[in-house]
Structure formats: structure tokens, C-alpha cells
Amino acid sequence: MALESQVAAQTSITETLRAQTHEFDNRLHTVSGLLQLGEYADAVAFVDELSRQRSEISSNVTRVVADPRVAALLVAKTSAAAEAGVELHVEPETHLPRLPAEHAADVLTVLGNLVDNALDATRGHGREISVRMTYDQGRVSVRVADTGPGIDPAHLEEVFVRGWSTKPSDATGRGVGLALVQAICQRGGGSVEATNGDHGAVLTAVVGGSR
């Protein structure tokens, strides 16, 4: 289980970095093109705006998330979501202290999988993902809501069954993410629940700090 959790976390991070690389390439090409056209003032303004946006994203996250590993993942996922045309925002109720390394690893895996799942749901259907994380007595609650089509009420429990997925049968990682999330939560005495909110699916996971 520990190895599977690590592999899932690394896969999620790799996909996030790939999306960021694509995003940065596009921006570098834009700057290069502006310079080649002699539009120096526009190039400077473009870079200044990018810097402002990055600073704003980082500030919004680190203001409520003290753990640097979780904060870094959230910042990266925000960029990955933007690349897909989806707005990811951290709810103001979020508050998370610095976590022990093993607990942080579990939170990273759970958060990464829930956000990736929400991204899959919102592509072509919705435009927003909201993340809320809170800490209480050694447990971290992670809530991820999206504006996708939601989950068929008949399948709310099945989404956690290994192998069950709405993805194509040949999709990478099909039916693994949410099953792994459930296993990690239950191992630490927590839980995970899938519901439908006003605008899409809502996944709420409680990650314990004990192993």
C-alpha cells in the first residue's frame, strides 16, 4: 500500500509538471514572438502580468496552507487546471499547519487524486474546482468540489471500487485513484465520501495522521 501510494503520488506530480512545462513553453514562445516583432513594451507588460499572477496564486495558497509540500502541490495543480481552461481556487475556510512527513505524503496523494479526478470531470463540462482543507486533532479534511456533470446517484458508492471508472477502458490509471484514496483514509481511521452538490460532484476525505 505504501509503495502504491508513492507511485500514485509521483504519477500525479509528473502529470502536473508536464502540464506546467507545456504552459511555460507557450508563455516563453509568446515572449519570444513579441521580442522578434519588436514589441518590447508588450513583452515587458506580458512578463509583469505573469509575475503578478504567479505571485497572487502563491500568496493565496501559502496564506492558508503552512505545509510547503501541500502548498507546492496546490500551486502546481492550479497551473495544471489553468492549462485545461479550468479555474481552481482554494476556499478561504482552508487552514493547514505544517504536517509530519508521512502524514503530508498521504495528504499529497489524496489531494492530488481528488483534484485530478475533478479535472477529468470538468473538462468539457464545467469551469471551476474548489478545494477546502482543514485540520483538527491530527486529522486533515480535504474537500474538492467541481462544476462537472456530477455522479450518477446509483454509482456514488461504486466510484471507490478498484477498476470502476467512467474513463475509456484503455485509459491510464483507470479506476485506481479513488480506490487508493479510500484505502489511505481508512488506514488512518478516516473516511472518504462522494456526493453531488449544487453544481457537480463533491468528494470529502478525512486523512488521519496514524499508520
Image: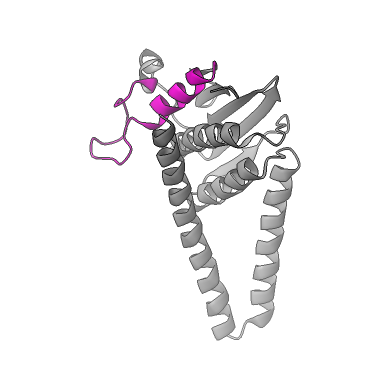
Furthest-front residue in this view: 211
Specify the principal SS of the magenta part: loop
Which residue lies at the image location 46% right of the left edge and 27% below the top edge? 181
Frontmost residue, 117 versus 152? 117
Q: Is residue 83 visible?
A: yes
Q: What stretch is highlighted in magenta?
A: 160-189
Say whether residue 124 is visible: no
Residue 125 part of the magenta-drawn span:
no
Q: Position of residue 150 (x, y in %)?
A: 45, 25
Which of the 4 quarters of the picture holds residue 206?
A: top right
Decide which of 177, 194 is in the foreground and name it: 177
Residue 3 placement: quadrant: top left
Q: Position of residue 95 (x, y in %)?
A: 72, 31
7 sits left or right of 72 in the view: left
Q: What colouring method underlies this structural image? A: one colour
Q: Where is residue 154 in the image (x, y as percent from the top left)?
A: 36, 13
Q: Residue at x 52, y 44 (%)?
A: 86
The outermost residue toward the left is 170
Q: Is residue 175 above or below residue 66?
A: above
Q: Residue 172 colored magenta?
A: yes
